[in-house]
Image (tube, coloured by chain):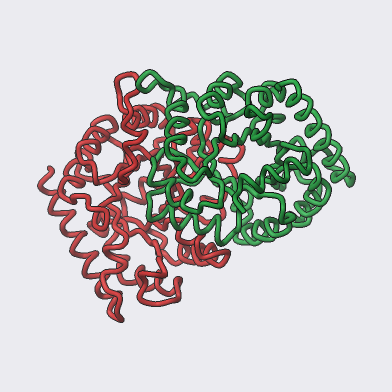
Chain colours: A green, B red
Amino acid sequence: MKFIDKLLNISRKNQSWLCIGLDPDPELMPQVDVLQFNKTIIEATSDLVCAYKPNLAFYEALGTEGLAILEKTVKYVPGDIPVIGDAKRSDIGNTARAYARALFSVLGFDAATVNPYLGFDSIEPFIDYQDKGVFILCRTSNRGATDFQNLYTNGLPLYEAVARKAKEWNTYGNIGLVVGATYPEELKKVRSICPEMPLLIPGIGAQGGDLASAVGYGVDARGEKAIINVSRQILYASKEKDFSEAARTMAEKIRNQINDYRNKAR
Amino acid sequence: MKFIDKLLNISRKNQSWLCIGLDPDPELMPQVDVLQFNKTIIEATSDLVCAYKPNLAFYEALGTEGLAILEKTVKYVPGDIPVIGDAKRSDIGNTARAYARALFSVLGFDAATVNPYLGFDSIEPFIDYQDKGVFILCRTSNRGATDFQNLYTNGLPLYEAVARKAKEWNTYGNIGLVVGATYPEELKKVRSICPEMPLLIPGIGAQGGDLASAVGYGVDARGEKAIINVSRQILYASKEKDFSEAARTMAEKIRNQINDYRNKAR
């Protein structure tokens, strides 16, 4: 099944556009066993999400064991929920092919994030996996994003040039964009350039993005395809033994808020 | 010891600015055991290089075992030769910190490559490791590089804006730039913007870059700090049992050619 269909199916079933970022940070976690932590979070929230998104950095920081934990985590997610590998990879064609194989064939992600700086031939090996989703970084949620992404090129900020190129490259219909919630006007602009694409929207919660505008500007004409990612606010809702209930309560609250804003946006 | 001193020491000792890219590709390799292949190449060439550069993609594509092979490969390199982790990582500050830890503390690289698209706060966690080298992608060697890197921003192509920012960010003197050999004029321009920085120059050999101009335009005023990377042309000089001698012969030839061009450049 194509990534976009898997995403739409589960989002309608779970009535949710919430994606939980599975970013285990030993300093913030209520318990030591990372795999068990992930499993508990997945069990507590799998009827409330449209996707999970592990960021590879947190697993690589755990050493070689980390990759084994990541592999088991991906397998533990129920089969009807897409898992997005947040890898932000970028390399030349020959090497990008190896990264695509690692993310899609070895680790088994349904989608991955990639960095556009190297241009089309660095993205092509990913989109060649036509059933997989490929989210290109467009306007990221961090402060430093303005250093290059907002520079004007031929009258357009770079992130808009990226959005336009992404649209042009989308032969197989499996490209999406990453646009941070922390810059609502930019999100609105990107949605207007790419009215049909799924947008992966980080930056809510710990990073300070506003949920109402993220949803209002992020959804498509049907009120869908805005994947709102939340990580720390849910994972670490409690550092005590009740962490899984606290995570569920927080996830449900945000899922419902997203739906309220979706209704208002229509 | 700081990365730059380690690099200068070994390059003077080995009379070499050749870096060998340790990119094991099972389809091209003369034998199946990747770790043994790497060890054999390192043994055959360690007196001919200024650095080794494993690209993480090729190890990730091997599955969880791949990371263990990478870790052992890094440890196997003699202690006076720097190892550059070609990872091209990019993420927001919190996550970039986890990547920096993975590359510098867990895997033990002396330097790493990073992608600039997310701006300063995505680079800062890397340069905070002041003894490590941080090579920022500037003008890459692939065809798609022109899609964004050559767009004009405030009268400058984006890669020049990146070079200027890198210079501005270089508080600890541990930043370098990646500039492909396939675009000699761009390399010349970058060297003029950053006369003191080490430049990591891929694109020779399989990618078609010209060695004479890569060296001539890449070196600093003392004829140093141009790290010429070659991967496939050396690793796969022979697919037969004589692969290690063939690799050594090719490495020696290129090392000597680089020195000839360095002498001409002065």
Give left or right: position of B8 versus A190: left
Kindly tell me whether residue B100 is visible in this rendering.
Answer: no
User: Left of B253 or right of it: where is A13?
Assistant: right
Residue projecting furthest to the front: A222
Pinpoint residue A131: horizontal percent, then vertical percent.
56, 52
How many badges with numbers are in the image? Answer: 0
- At 38% from the left and 49% from the top, the residue drawn is A92
Left or right side of A176 for A46: right
Quadrant of the image containing the N terminus of chain A: bottom right
Q: Is residue A254 above or below residue A174?
A: above
Q: Nearer the viewer, residue B96 or A207?
A: A207
Residue drawn at x 35%, y 29% is: B158
Look at 26% across and 69% down and name the residue there.
B237
Would you place residue B37 above or below residue B4 in this image? below
Q: Is residue A53 visible?
A: yes
Q: Position of residue A52 (x, y in %)?
A: 69, 46
**Residue found at the far bottom of this picture:** B241
Q: Is residue A211 above or below residue B25?
A: above
Frontmost residue, B13 versus A216: A216
Q: Position of residue A74 (x, y in %)?
A: 67, 56
Q: Residue at x 21, y 59 (%)?
A: B255
- In the figure, residue B175 lies in which quadrant? top left
> For this rendering, which residue is in front, A101 or A80?
A80
> In the picture, which quadrant includes the C terminus of chain A?
top right
Q: Nearer the viewer, residue A259 or B222?
A: A259
Residue A242 x, y percent position in the rendering:
89, 44
